[in-house]
Amino acid sequence: MDRIPILQMGDLLLVTIQVDMHDQLALTLQDDLTEKIQRSGARGVLIDISALDIVDSFIGRMISTISSLARIMDATTVLVGMQPAVAITLVELGLDLRGVRTALNVERGMRLLQQPDASP
Amino acid sequence: MAALQQRTLDLIRGNEEQILAQWQQNLATAGQNQDNRISQQQLDGQVRRFWQLFLQALSAGESTGPQSVQWQELRRFLEELSAERARHGFNSSETATFVFSLKRALFEQLQLGYADAKHELGDQLWAISELLDQLGLHTVKAFQKSREEVIQRQQEEMLELSTPVVKLWEGVLALPMIGTLDSQRTQVVMESLLQRIVDTGSEIAIIDITGVPTVDTLVAQHLLKTVTAIRLMGADAIISGVRPQIAQTIVHLGLDLQGIVTKANLADALALALKRTGQIVTRTEG
Amino acid sequence: MIAGNGSIPVRVEQDVVLARQTVRQLAVALGLRLIDQTKLVTAASELARNAVIHGGGGEMHWETVERGMRRGIRLAFADQGAGIADQAKALTDGWSSGSGMGLGLSGSRRLVDEFELDSAPGQGTRVTITKWS
């Protein structure tokens, strides 16, 4: 089964989602990320969704869950690159992903993770 | 709708050249080709194309009229024709004349063809008339829709112009909102602000509501949705132009601004934005 | 110019992806603005998933519609599942209530122009949504 690759850069994990994920793929990603955070002791997780033109409630929940699980393992999650149409739609859908930090792009996301950690 | 008899269909098909010639003659008389808005060649092309689709639809068998699926291609052609005419500045009657001028040509052929059957003639003339009337009406409706779309687009462009997103500073955008924030307007404005944030990589958007007369629950909701979307994208917003009365209204209505900072004026908002983005403005000597 | 109708099964989760792609193609073909495309595809994703997970699998019917000069897309998600007992409750935001359809139903309603829910216990569910260009 195909999986979304997770890149490790120092104590940061980077996930770039570029495919239209079916639910199982999303859940696999969630599991893989959680496992990798634990194994690598990563302090930060960057999820890049700049290539996604659809984010529905399932993916939204996945992102929230990853963020919560990461926090338990003392890692901060930053969601980057949300497209405008996606943002508007998510707000209308009623999802505000509270507790998930966001940044405009990977570069800013990394900068954010390097700052002293304040609770989201 | 009255049904067209096979005899009528045969007459139409059999006398194609005469009908087309007569139609083009009628169009010339109506002044359709004396126009530099459309060339004779283009007009002839449209006549031929219409005719082709017209025959096609007639041959497709029993139908309930021009609204049914057999007539779809012809309807689409008429819609494109109308849209083009609208763009070139024709009015709706000039556009409908394209279809109505065909009536006369068809009538003449039917009169000749049914000379021996006056009773059926009346019936078939009526059927043809109904058919072409509906097609003519379709062009008028399509024409009006195109005009509405042009106006709508112009309105949107005006909206964009009247609510310009301004780059105030490196990484700081400002959006002066003017007038009442009715839904459609807010939507267009929201979308263009979000897109500019992505395009410029700006982290702070200052939404200035000095020009907004009242803030009620609906307005606050719109603002809140916009700011939530901005935050999801990885930027943030400051609301400026919050007059004391508005501040009071917000408190009175118990509106939860969810941590959005508000400032009385644009200057204060900019100062905060600069601070947040780690920028300093220094005065130089001399 | 696209016109007509069709239907695709939504029985397994891969079908939800297919539903999204189908609706995206339709929306693009009909000339919907990007934001409207996004809203419709997202709504379709929610409702297709509901049909798979809560309805035991079903179908998505699509058709292009016309109202005067306006054109639109109508989608109907039908399943033969348990049906919804309390419609009013299902239509309020269930985000925090954990299990169940969560935001799918109520959220989708906000994303489209027309929304119709036809469901009763033991009689399956049919949700019809329309988005105009």
Image (cartoon, coloured by chain):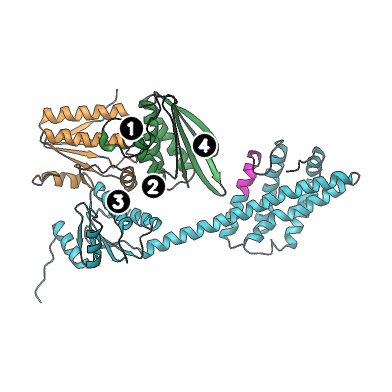
Q: What residue is disc 3 on?
A: B225
Chain identifier matching the cyan colour in the rendered picture: B
In terms of image quadrants, where is residue A92? Answer: top left
Residue type marked 2: Ile
Residue type marked 3: Lys
In terms of image quadrants, where is residue B210? Answer: bottom left
| Subunit of label 1 | C
N-terminal of the two: label 2 or label 4?
A: 2
Helix, strand, or loop for circle 2? helix
Label 1 with label 3: CB-CB less than 8 Å: no
Q: Spatial distance from mark 1 to mark 3, Cα to Cα? A: 23 Å
Q: Spatial distance from mark 1 to mark 2, Cα to Cα? A: 24 Å
Residue with the most extreme right position: B116
Q: How dense is the environment of label 4, judged by Cα within 10 Å: few (below 14), some, or many (20 and up)? A: some
Q: Is residue B166 above or below residue B105?
A: below
A24 or B21, nearer to the observer: A24
Chain identifier matching the green colour in the rendered picture: C
Q: What residue is disc 1 on?
A: C101
Residue type marked 1: Met
Which SS type dominates the magenta stretch?
Answer: helix
Which colour denotes chain A? Answer: orange
Q: What residue is disc 2 on?
A: C35
Residue with the most extreme bottom position: B286
Q: Spatial distance from mark 3 to mark 4, Cα to Cα? A: 31 Å
Boundaries of the magenta span: B66-77
Helix, strand, or loop for circle 4? strand
Q: Spatial distance from mark 1 to mark 4, Cα to Cα? A: 25 Å
Residue type marked 4: Glu
Q: Spatial distance from mark 2 to mark 4, Cα to Cα? A: 20 Å
N-terminal of the two: label 1 or label 2?
A: 2
Residue B141 x %, y %: 60, 54
